Amino acid sequence: MKSQTLGRWRADTHNVNSNGVSFMNIGTIDRLLRVIVGLVLIALVFVGPQTPWGWIGVVPLVTGAFRFCPAYRLLGLNTCAIKS
């Protein structure tokens, strides 16, 4: 496992904690859909109905960017491909 030291913090380059457990729980297709839906919802703030509800698109955008969904963790879901 490759890691970098950032000050006093250690950042694992493969999103794995010290116990070898991955923090990623969002797969590639799920990630792509979240980013697209997030961008479309945020666009609703500026075009179309111009509703502030479009800011809810930040949630799927951020979870797609970080490949981690807290709700998936709570529900025990994981859409990442298993690497052998």
Image (cartoon, rainbow, N blue to C red):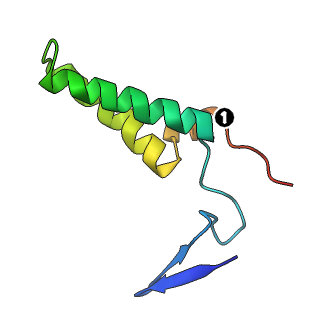
Residue found at the far right of this picture: 84
Q: Is residue 68 left or right of residue 14?
A: left
Q: Residues within 10 Å of mark 1 (few under 14, many from 20)?
A: few
Q: Residue 41: x percent and y percent?
A: 29, 24
Q: Is residue 35 above or below residue 83?
A: above
The tally of labels here is 1
Residue appearing at x 25%, y 29% in the figure: 42
Q: Is residue 42 left or right of residue 51?
A: right
Q: In which quadrant will I find the N terminus?
A: bottom right
Q: Is residue 6 left or right of residue 81?
A: left
Residue appearing at x 74%, y 43% in the figure: 81
> Which residue was labeled with disc 1?
77
Identify the secondary structure beneath mark 1: loop
Q: Is residue 4 above or below residue 54?
A: below
Q: Residue 31: x percent and y percent?
A: 53, 38
Q: Nearer the viewer, residue 15 or 36?
A: 36
Q: Residue 67: x percent and y percent?
A: 53, 47
Q: Nearer the viewer, residue 46 or 3?
A: 46
Q: Is residue 50 above or below residue 70?
A: above
Q: Is residue 75 above or below residue 4?
A: above
Q: Quadrant of residue 76?
A: top right
Amino acid under disc 1: Leu
Q: In which quadrant will I find the C terminus?
A: bottom right
Residue appearing at x 53%, y 82% in the figure: 4
Q: Nearer the viewer, residue 24 or 43?
A: 43
Residue appearing at x 50%, y 29% in the figure: 33
